[in-house]
Amino acid sequence: MVIHLSRNLTVAAAAYSSRPWQVGAAVCYCPNVKPSPFLGHFPSHHGKSPSGQGIKNSVHASRISALFWGAKKAVEPTERDLSLGEFILTGSGPEGVSENQVAPKKISVSVVSSILDVPSQDWDACNMDATGPEKFNPFLTHGFLSSLEETGCAVKETGWMPRHIIANDECDNILGVVPLYLKSHSYGEFVFDYSWADAYYSYGSRYYPKLQCCVPFTPVTGQRILVRNNSYKDQVFDSLVSAMKDLTAKFQVSSLHVTFPTESEWDKMKEKGFLQRTGMQYHWKNRNYKNFDEFLMDMKQSKRKNIRQERKKISTQNLTMKRLRGYEIKAKHWDSFYKFYRNTTDNKWGSPYLTRDFFHNMGSKMEDQVLLVVAEEGDELVAGALNLIGGDTLFGRLWGCLPRAYYPSLHFEACYYQAIEAAIELNLNKVEAGAQGEYKIQRGYMPVTTYSCHYFLDKGFEKAINEFLVRETAQVKLVMKLLHESGPFKDGIQT
């Protein structure tokens, strides 16, 4: 059976890798993909019907809903008995205190059904300690994640059932947290496993529900196991990873996926029995540039000329670009941006994962961590690009413009050039522009490696997945090498 599965998976994976996937931060466009037999009851958001005709716009108004379906589903967990046990922590304790003076600590690990069950100051303390201020990630904050839940974006009804893991000590202090979701589909993840679901179904088993550790709808790298910075942090990390694996077995689901972790977490999880997968994104690096022109001087002459020509088109179209932060962003801006966002999802035959209320709620909570780039034609807002500001990184996420409007080069200006200028102005080390879009390379955004970790209960299926990942990893490395060699920078800069 394992050999048979491996053959099926190879065929499925080859078909998957050849399909023209295109994604945005919260848009999943898959025009030519035949849904898995296990996804037979999923609403048709894929953009084309089997006959090849476009789906009517009325389809796009519907949103992804949960599919904890029929006879092949796992036992849906209840609110009862969500304790994952207790762990004894031992160690040398604080500096200057001998080991025999420090009593072992006991932590209890449990699951909560909403991030709102966790005080924001405790969650954010774990997030800040996990990275330090210099690597602060705004997407892992209580404000961002709670906005997704409060506004109906990442909830059970949309197939994202929150099952966050919390570690408390004996005094009920929170020592670690993990953003975790029980998922009934694979949408909004950006590490594609649709072919795995097909193969798993052919294998005679259910793939969904599954557990997903990530930031919903957001392909951004960052810590996934958020632990307070104390003498027991490594043991707390290990306890939380063990608890995640235990929960996979307890919920009787097929698998556990940790997507876009840091490289160090990726390495640690390999030691815990997780399979390793790599992907690719496009990031811009700041080489201590004083201004945009100084950045351009690092590029080949032809690329530098092309960028300057694209930027000139903005003024010739009577467009004005503005970068807004915090209190400068008003309700009208979020209402307009939601229209832009919906236009993008409609044009890309995607699903509007995010609601209007999400943007208002998130903007209110995140304040100065939000950078909204807007384009104005006269007094009218015509386009916008949403960014979040981290400790050393500007994260570009969403873009959109008015329906039926076309402004040459505005997408490049709003999403890439304005982000570079902002990063230089804010003295940030890089801009993360997300997945897909090789056109980003010619504008200074070079390929970087991203990571994910995967744990399967079925060891036969795990073996077949691992064989596929070995081949895929070699392919990703080759593609990245070729892209760097043909890059836009002089003398191999930024390779």
Image (cartoon, grey):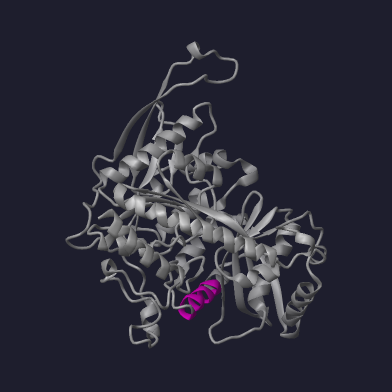
Which image quarter: residue 148? bottom left
x and y percentages locating residue 424 in the rendered image: 75, 58
Q: Which residue sits at x=42%, y=78%?
A: 31
Q: Which residue is drawn at 49% across and 12% down?
A: 101
Relative to 84, 332 lies left or right: right
Identify which residue, 127 or 318, lies in the foreground: 127
Does 153 sit left or right of 364 as displayed? left
Is residue 458 positioned above or below 104 on the image?
below
Of 441 and 315, the residue lying toward us? 441
Residue segment shown in magenta: 336-347
Pick the residue in front: 345 or 466.
466
Q: Is residue 218 left or right of residue 374?
A: left
Q: Which residue lies furthest to the front in this view?
A: 3
Q: Percent position (x, y) of residue 447?
A: 62, 61
Residue beneath the point at 31% across and 47% down: 459
Looking at the image, residue 225 lies above or below residue 59: above
Q: Where is residue 357 in the image (x, y as percent from the top left)?
A: 45, 65
Q: Considering the image in quadrants, where does the N terminus appear?
A: bottom left
| Residue 340 on the magenta span | yes
What is the x, y in percent for residue 488?
A: 73, 68
Residue found farthest to the left? 71
Can the viewer see residue 185? no
Is 167 included in the stretch rendered in magenta?
no
**Residue 325 location, quadrant:** bottom right
